[in-house]
Image (cartoon, grey):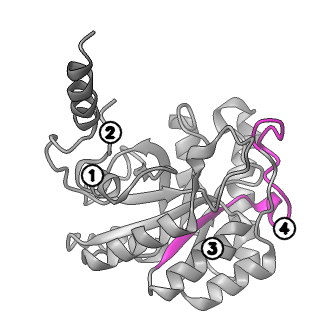
Amino acid sequence: MNPLWLLTALPAAWLLRRSWWLKDIPGLPVLVYHKIGNPPPNSSLKDLWVTPENFEKQVIWLKEKGYETISFSRLASMHKEKKPLKGNEILITFDDGYENNYRYAWPILAKHKSIGNIFVVYNTIGKTNIWHNPKTEPWIDMADEKMLLEMQESGWIEFGSHTMNHPKLTQIPYEDAVWEIRESKKQLEGLLKREMTAFAYPYGLGAYDEKIRKAVLDAGYVLDFSFTQGKTSWPWQREFKTIDRLFIKKNENLWDLSLHIKKGKSKVF
């Protein structure tokens, strides 16, 4: 094989893999993060980790580009009142409710006057991420009640439900799934003394079906978020689809972030 050909082909393949050549997609961008910090050496889910340094760069970039970070309650009001997007709104969301969100993400957001939204697994508050296999993804601390209340009091963090125990709702008895959906709303509202307008389905592919989604909407949530990659057309056709999100991974840079927001994904394969 000609080494010169290889040297030119590899950068071309890298460029073509990025979505820069796709058309811009209109709609609401919702970023989704999980853990802010450095992954343990034996982590098999390193893509779920974003370093504090990279996260802060991303928050600064959003501010510099004129994006307005908004809360679940603000988005719920926009949906109810049928308000159009101005074009610069964006949601920053975190799944699960890790202690590192409190330790790293919240101070960064507050420093740059940006709003974040955290989906909490109620029964793991102050405990660990017990749904992971500790042999492949070490258990780490979850935020406790005091941390949640402190973040909420600051005005820079709002919360939504991510069930009671983080099950895959389509793989447990329907009655148990309904309980996970309803009880988490009830318990979080009791703890935080405010309405839970937002729900996120745990896991990606197969996380919900028509029956499960109806149970979520019937429970009184205004907004339901999936892990489906993409942006959501606005006004949101709530009866037909969930709110999609843009998964920000460990090694993605500011160009990747820009591509996510403009194209609905940073890579095409």
Q: Which residue is mark 2?
A: 267
Q: Are marks 2 and 1 in contact (CB under 8 Å)?
A: yes
Instruction: Looking at the picture, tell me which residue is in the foreground, 70 or 24.
Output: 24
Residue that lies at the very extreme toward the top in this rendered image: 1
Residue that lies at the very extreme toward the bottom in this rendered image: 154
Name the image quarter holding residue 60.
bottom left
* Amino acid type at image mark 3: Tyr
| Label at residue 259 | 1
The crowding category of the residue bearing disc 2, from other C-alpha atoms within 10 Å (few below 14, some 14 to 19, many at least 20), is: some
Q: Secondary structure at mark 2?
A: loop
| Label at residue 126 | 4
Q: Gap between marks 1 and 4, in whole Å?
A: 36 Å
* Amino acid type at image mark 1: Leu
Q: Secondary structure at mark 3?
A: helix
Apparent side of residue 94 relative to residue 247 in the rendered image (left or right): right
Q: Secondary structure at mark 4?
A: loop
Apparent side of residue 266 relative to residue 202 in the rendered image (left or right): left
Q: Gap between marks 2 and 3, in whole Å?
A: 27 Å
Q: Gap between marks 2 and 1, in whole Å?
A: 8 Å
